[in-house]
Each structure stands twice: as structure tokens, then as C-alpha cells.
Amino acid sequence: MSDLLRASVFPHTLLVGASGPIGRAVSRLSGVHDLPVVATSRSGSLTVDVAIPAQVEAILRSVRPEALVYLVRAQRGASDRQIGTAVEQMLRVASLAVQAGVSRFVLASSAAVYGDRHRAPRRESDPTEGVSAYATEKITAERQLERFALDRGLSAASARIFNVFGPGCRDSLLNALVEGPPPVLAVTPHFVRDYVHVDDVASALLLAAQRDDVIGAVNIGSGRGVDNSQLAAACPDRYVDGDASIRSFSVADPAYAKASLAWQPREDPFEYVSLRRPRV
């Protein structure tokens, strides 16, 4: 992790929605580096439900953070109405945070905002063309947060996180390849993803929390495209054949994150697969 993460200069940070793998990784790294981060979730030891403003206000009064990292998202399969509610709750938390003296807000967004029909790594200035419900939520949240931040003088960034793998990432194809059950894999060089380890994502979020000069979208990805034929070669006995006609591409251009946050992803997806997959 970057030596920029020093407890002496790190802002007091509130982590909202910390029960998932990214939140747990942020909490773990903040503990290792003795950083002043307070983690909350709807079901953890420190409970905060963003749907209940009184709980948000209470934790803000208690912690008095300078920065807030927001990891909450709508549930899978959310309706348009539920997505709208999720964005409204995020903005309410941002408003309460500003009232409590928070000066920095980092939203966990997603590479889904770009869609997957391109053939080159995506830059932050590229159009947001994702059409899934998840992409719609993140696109709307980013735009609403940007307008709110400009209006209220809040320093805000949206971390566009690419395909996360590592401890606890049950939805990751890499995790499925090493942990099972064997996933359906479209064995084709035309299905390409940018895999970034959960600890690398966590370090990027921690760095973003302390850099109030980094505004707007920031890609959090390795910049390395890994296609499914490469994964099949690395795990020849660990998958079920899928539709090889699928074409899909989602890779980051991480130059802005590397320059502005002094961030560098460290974990290699093929090392993760080779070190952890069962031997036969």
C-alpha cells in the first residue's frame, strides 16, 4: 500500500455499508495501518441503516468524521423505484454529512456505468452507456452527487470499480474458478475483464478519502484485460463450457487513479488462481 496512508495525516473517516467484501477489506487495512476509520453497516456490530436518518445523524455526531466512504447499493434485481430510493438515501446521507462538517465524500461506483460493448480501455471522460439496473443506479448516483457537491461545496469522488476478486468476493468468476462450484465459462478471447483484487480496491478508497483535490470519476482497475480463454487455460478442470459466441469487454484505463492517488494495484489475477486452485 502507498506510504501516503499515514495515520498522522489521514482524515477521520466514516465507512458506510461496510458488511461486504470491499468494506471488510477497508476495515482490515485501516486496522493494519492504524488509520482512524469507523466502519458501519446495517447488520454489523456498529449498526447504521441509511434508510433511518436518525441513525445516520447519531453516528455522525458520535464519530465527527472529516471524510465519508459510501459503499451502500440497491439490492440485486432492484426496480426503478428501488433504485431511485437508493439514490435518494445516498443524497440524504451526503446532506447530513455536510451538516455534520464532513468535507470529503467518496462514492463506490462501478465499471458497469460504461457498458461492455467497447474494444478499448475506458477513460473517465468516456460516455456512460451501461444499461443494466445496476449501471443505471450508479450513473444516476454519480450525476446526482456531482450536482449536490457543486451546490454545497463538498469535495466528492466516484470510484468506478472494475471486477473485484479476492477474499469474500463470491460473485467473482476468479473466486468461482478456485473455490467452486465450477462456473459456466464462455471460453472465448472476446469476453474480456479487468480483475482487481479487493485489497487493492480498499487501498484506493482509503487514498481517495484523504485526497480532497481529486474530484469526479476515478477508475479503479488494473488496466489489464484478461479474457476467458486465458482463464480456461489456467484452470482447465475447473469450469463448465458456456456460450463461446459472447462478446463483452470491460477494461479500465487507470492512469488518472495512478497519477492522482499515487495508487498502484499489486495483486495478479493469475497468481491468485494458480496459488489457490485445488490440485488434482
Image (cartoon, grey):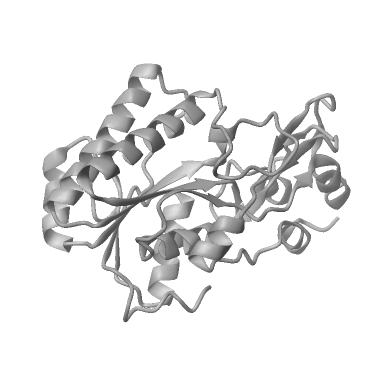
> 82 or 233, which lies in front?
82
Residue drawn at x 46%, y 28% is 76
Which image quadrant for residue 263?
bottom right
Toward the top, the furthest residue is 80
- Residue 5: percent from left, percent from top: 43, 74
The correct choice, above or below, for 174 with respect to 244 in the image is: below
The correct choice, above or below, for 143 with respect to 254 in the image is: above
Residue drawn at x 66%, y 31% is 116
- Report the side of 231 relative to 30 (left or right): right
Quarter the C terminus occupies: bottom right
The correct choice, above or below, for 91 with respect to 231 in the image is: above
- Residue 227: percent from left, percent from top: 79, 43
- Using the rendered image of the protein, determine whether residue 49 is visible from the camera's viewpoint: no
- Report the side of 118 relative to 58 (left or right): right
> 261 or 242, which lies in front?
261
Residue drawn at x 65%, y 56% is 222
- Report the side of 17 relative to 1 (left or right): left
Which image quadrant for residue 118?
top right
- Using the rendered image of the protein, determine whether residue 79 is visible from the camera's viewpoint: yes
Toward the bottom, the furthest residue is 8
- Residue 148: percent from left, percent from top: 27, 39
Residue drawn at x 22%, y 35% is 51
> 145 or 7, which lies in front?
145
- Residue 220: percent from left, percent from top: 55, 53
Total numbered circles? 0
The correct choice, above or below, for 178 with respect to 138 in the image is: below
